[in-house]
Image (spheres, rainbow, N blue to C red):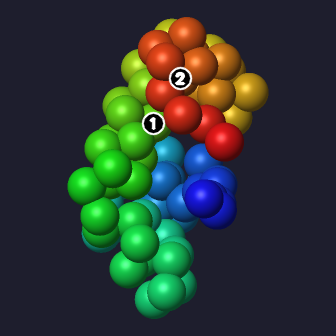
Amino acid sequence: GAYYQVPLRSLRPKGLPNLWVAGRCISADHDALASTRVMAPSLVLGQAAGTAAVLDLRDEGGADHVQASLREQGAFIG
């Protein structure tokens, strides 16, 4: 089936550098938000937000590092 990717920047609210979000809180238009509220995407987004937060604390942030860590965890990246 078809899939789409969610940019990492969608999980970080502007002006709040110490906050990562998932679920209904991400930055997306109405149609995209509709599909992220389903359980599987919601779980993956939560895992991505948590991973990004930990890597930020270690000063190892950035999309490439987050994707590599998620792959090591067995997450579907796309």
On screen, residue 63 above or below 41: above
- Residue at point 47%, 61% (across, down): 13
Q: Position of residue 51 (x, y in %)?
A: 43, 26
Q: Position of residue 76 (x, y in %)?
A: 54, 34
Q: Residue 56: tell me if it is visible.
A: no
> In this figure, which residue is indicated by the disc labeled 2?
70
Seen from the viewer's position, the closer of residues 59 and 39 is 39
Query: Which of the 4 image quarters holds residue 37?
Result: bottom left
Tell me the quarter of the image containing the C terminus.
top right
Residue, disc 1: 48
Q: Tell me which amino acid carries mark 1.
A: Ala
Residue 32's disc is none
Dot 2 amino acid type: Leu
- Pointer 2 with pointer 1, Cβ within 8 A: yes
| Whether residue 6 is situated above or below residue 68 in the rendered picture | below
User: What secondary structure is marked by label 1?
Assistant: helix
Q: Seen in the image, is 53 located left or right of residue 77?
A: left
Extreme residue in the bottom direction: 30
Quarter the N terminus occupies: bottom right
Residue placed at 74% from the left, 27% from the top?
Answer: 64
Q: Is residue 28 above or below residue 59?
A: below
